[in-house]
Amino acid sequence: ASQAEAMSKRIQFMYGGKLKKVKIRYTGTDIDAILDRLPTAKILNEEDGAYIVTEEVFGSGIDMWLRSQRSYVELLQ
């Protein structure tokens, strides 16, 4: 895939910015809710219903989205 294609698959959350990698712990009831919002996310691990997920996103808007998920999402990196 070209660089433009790879970049177009990354999610931009409201604010532009540099590409950054995030790592989260998700403990909600449906991991598909995260995978739908973060389509290139990769599940690294699942244990007792908690998922460790990585994703590359543009900008800092991801921080606001993560806060909106409240107790279901913990930012690890």
Image (tube, helix red, strand yellow):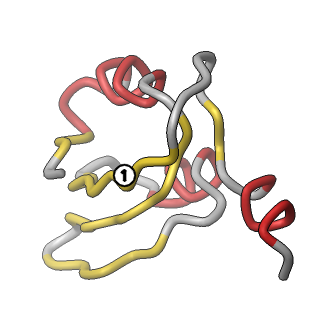
Q: Nearer the viewer, residue 8 or 18?
A: 18
Q: Quadrant of the N terminus?
A: bottom right
Q: Is residue 77 left or right of residue 66?
A: left
The residue to which callout 1 is attached is 29
Q: Position of residue 42 (x, y in %)?
A: 46, 74
Residue type of the residue flagged with mark 1: Thr
Q: Position of residue 10 (x, y in %)?
A: 66, 52
Q: Is residue 47 left or right of residue 51?
A: left
* Count of number-bearing discs: 1
Q: Is residue 18 above or below residue 69?
A: below
Q: Is residue 7 above or below residue 72?
A: below
Q: Position of residue 46 (x, y in %)?
A: 24, 78
Q: Residue at x 35, y 25 (%)?
A: 63
Q: Residue at x 27, y 67 (%)?
A: 51
Q: Residue at x 37, y 64 (%)?
A: 54
Q: Is residue 43 above or below residue 6?
A: below
Q: Position of residue 43 (x, y in %)?
A: 39, 76
Q: Is residue 71 left or right of residue 62?
A: left
Instruction: Kindly indicate the quadrant of the structure image that contains residue 31.
Output: bottom left
Instruction: Kindly indicate the quadrant of the structure image that contains residue 66.
Output: top left
Q: Nearer the viewer, residue 26 or 62?
A: 62
